[in-house]
Amino acid sequence: MKDKTIHIIGAGPAGLAAAINLAKAGYEAIVHEKHDDVGNRFDGDFQGIENWSSKEDALSFLKKIGIQINFICAPYRTGHFYGPNLKQVEIKASRPLFYLIERGVGTGSFDQGLKQQALAAGVQFIWNDNVQKLPSEKTIVGTGPKAADVIAKGILFKTSHPNAYYGFLDDRIAPKGYAYLLINEGKATFATCMFENFRDSDHYFEGALKMMQKTVNIDIQEPVPFGGFGNFFLPASKHKNDKALYVGESAGFQDALWGFGIRYALLSGYLAARSILNGEDYEKLTRRYILPSQKASLANRLVFDRFGNWGHQRMLNHMSRSDDALGILQGYYQLSLSRRLLFRIAKRWYHTRLIDKQCMHKNCNCIWCRCGKEDDTRKAELEKMMIA
């Protein structure tokens, strides 16, 4: 069955989505994971599968790509936001704005749910396997972000506050980014996401926490610090080695504005599997189904950055006047003529902090050009800074 053996490096959402679809189609899918379980990069923090960039609801999307709901997947529709003037703005949507999920190794987590689906489909796992060279067979690479274009610094805590979500837009607490509070069944995640000034993350987090406590009446019990980071670059999936298909953030698939990359990750994993199963060109698939939204997100990032706090408040006011904020957000993700022009400017302005993307050297079989130790050291230093 050697001709139907596919190696997947990395047991994140992108890699597991690929493995599940390949195994269901009769392929021998072998997942190599550097840790001893899935979800070790996360601490039980809440994230979201975004539902605003497409008219297709996320639940329908998950079903279409072969993913079942065996994990916490809570719909969140109406929420409250605060801009620089600290006035509460209610955002309403005709369907869930996002589906809340939990990341990590805990029961009910998104990561553990995907692992169980993979095992049920017959996927093989090789744990504690920090692969450095590509196997001789066809390989899917989903090793996650390798640089920080955005970081999140926050806390996890218990609370008696009812389920809710809050957003905060203010460059004084989240430079070029945002802060968020997600509450589900007595647990909460609060963090500030920054696109610059990473070394001052403590200062910004403290300011964000004060703003949150000033505006939201919530009790904070047993707080635990956490941090995370994400990577975005274009052209996303470009590579020279035809043995490897790069998926998720290892291919740069991430939203340049909001950093909600899970839908990108799952879709890229599914498309990689589809390219193998049907003999389709993976580059063409990603250009058709992923790249337009990515381009729009980078154009949105340019507008978001240039107008700063004044623009944040204007955007919130505009969305609050609508009975369905989803329609407005979906408009932001259409690659209109104006956004195409903005994208041309934005791609010259923004550059990933990643020096070497996936291996682009002819005939090189490295997973990463700087394979291994130096890269892991940089990641460890960054994680220490965020969690300290």
Image: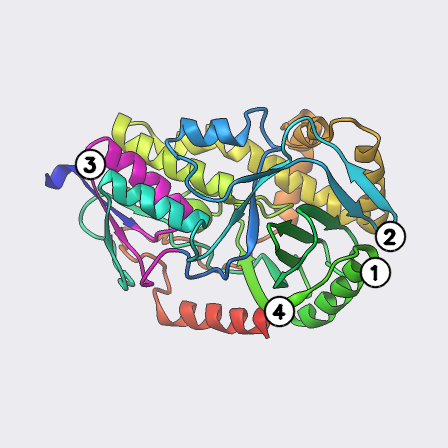
Badge 2 marks a residue whose secondary structure is loop
The boundaries of the magenta stretch are 9-38
Residue for badge 1: 214
- Report the disc number at residue 222: 4
Mark 4 Cα-neighbour bin, 10 Å: few <14, some 14–19, many ≥20: few
Where is 204 relative to 357, above or below?
A: below
Q: Amino acid at mark 2?
A: Leu
- Report the disc number at residue 27: 3
Disc with the residue nearer the chain's start (4 vs 1): 1
Give the Cα separation between the discs numbered 3 and 4. Answer: 46 Å
Give the Cα separation between the discs numbered 3 and 2. Answer: 54 Å
Residue for badge 2: 86
Badge 3 marks a residue whose secondary structure is loop
Mark 3 Cα-neighbour bin, 10 Å: few <14, some 14–19, many ≥20: many
Q: Are marks 3 and 4 in contact (CB under 8 Å)?
A: no
Badge 4 marks a residue whose secondary structure is strand
Q: Are marks 4 and 2 in contact (CB under 8 Å)?
A: no
